[in-house]
């Protein structure tokens, strides 16, 4: 009692910080997808038309950057409805019965399995996903997930820097609260963190989910260094602000609140108390401050 509840991924303040850190790089958002080669189209525009086209592009880019949900893993289904011993041995295979009423949301659709031993039970999540895909096919999803999503194959994808591709495929293939969806996302974020490849997801809809994952696990040092090295000081302070929201008990959260700290001062206090790589971040900050001093002097 009395403890403030930790903010959730969908909270407005959290989403606002994550969007700020994601960045809006139109060239990256609209980079060409590998398709057949077609000559580019050029248009002559007035100043007003160009402004309108840019505004539309920004609106479209914002839609493309809407973050997928981050959910808790769904509880397994293990409900036996009946044990009809008199049916035992009459069949050698399972039978799956699916309610095909079109208007029912898939989550509420009644799907049951009759086992050869006479047990009638509710279908597991995996069985449900397969049956729903058979009767109500979703584009980009397969009835049996591609082997690409298995842990032993993910390494190949990561070595090719195809982290964004695998996450896009994962969103198409799995439900956001399924164990596979969560596992593939976490493996991808861990690989990016291991090799400091954060920029692969910057200006994509996956960046916010990655930041949320790293901040929750207090694994922010690499990302903080990356942001400072790229002169993204606003992003660095947003990262620390989010860290303080999720870990309000930490020393730097209290110091920041008492001293109303911002910018470089906020980063310095955070690094002193929370960082495992204090010297690295101090060096990155020093280089940033020297570069700023030089540019101000010139």
Image (cartoon, rainbow, N blue to C red):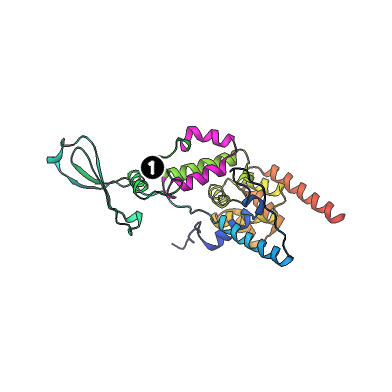
Is 217 on the left-hand or right-hand side of 23? left
Q: Residue at x 67, y 44 (%)?
A: 278
Magenta-colored segment: predominant secondary structure:
helix
In terms of image quadrants, where is residue 116? top left
Q: Position of residue 297 (x, y in %)?
A: 87, 55
Say whether residue 217 is left or right of residue 287.
left
Say whether residue 172 is visible.
yes
Q: Is residue 247 above or below residue 193?
A: below
Q: Is residue 111 magenta?
A: no
Q: Quadrant of residue 247?
A: bottom right
In percent of width and height, residue 235 lies at 66, 54
Q: Which residues are magenta?
A: 149-178
Q: Nearer the viewer, residue 100 or 177?
A: 100
Quadrant assignment for the N terminus: bottom left
In the figure, 152 relative to 97: above or below? above
Q: Would residue 172 be counted in the magenta stretch?
A: yes
Q: Give whichever of 39, 236 is nearer the camera.
A: 39
- The percent coordinates of residue 20 (x first, y second) are 62, 58
The residue under label 1 is: 143
Q: Position of residue 101 (x, y in %)?
A: 29, 56
């Amino acid at each position: 009692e009395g403890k403030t509840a930790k903010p959730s991924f969908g909270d407005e303040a959290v989403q606002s910080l994550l969007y700020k850190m994601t960045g809006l790089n139109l060239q990256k958002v609209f980079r060409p997808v590998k398709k057949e080669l077609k000559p580019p189209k050029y248009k002559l525009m007035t100043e007003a038309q160009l402004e309108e086209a840019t505004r539309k592009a920004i609106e479209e880019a914002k839609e493309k950057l809407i973050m997928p949900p981050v959910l808790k893993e769904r509880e397994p289904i293990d409900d036996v409805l009946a044990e009809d011993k008199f049916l035992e041995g009459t069949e050698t295979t399972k039978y799956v019965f699916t309610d095909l009423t079109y208007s029912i949301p898939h989550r509420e659709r009644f799907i049951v399995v009759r086992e050869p031993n006479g047990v009638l039970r509710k279908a597991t999540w995996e069985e449900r996903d397969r049956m729903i895909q058979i009767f109500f096919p979703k584009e980009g999803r397969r009835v049996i997930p591609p082997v690409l999503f298995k842990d032993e194959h993910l390494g190949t994808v990561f070595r090719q820097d195809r982290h964004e591709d695998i996450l896009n495929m994962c969103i198409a293939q799995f439900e956001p609260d399924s164990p596979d969806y969560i596992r593939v996302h976490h493996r991808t974020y861990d690989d990016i963190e291991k090799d400091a490849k954060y920029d692969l997801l910057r200006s994509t809809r996956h960046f916010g989910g990655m930041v949320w994952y790293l901040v929750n696990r207090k694994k922010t040092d690499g990302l903080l260094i990356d942001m400072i090295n790229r002169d993204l000081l606003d992003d660095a302070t947003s990262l620390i602000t989010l860290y303080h929201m999720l870990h309000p008990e930490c020393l730097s959260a209290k110091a920041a609140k008492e001293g109303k700290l911002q910018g470089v001062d906020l980063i310095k206090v955070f690094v002193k108390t929370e960082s495992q790589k204090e010297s690295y971040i101090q060096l990155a900050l020093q280089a940033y401050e020297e570069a700023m001093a030089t540019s101000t002097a010139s």
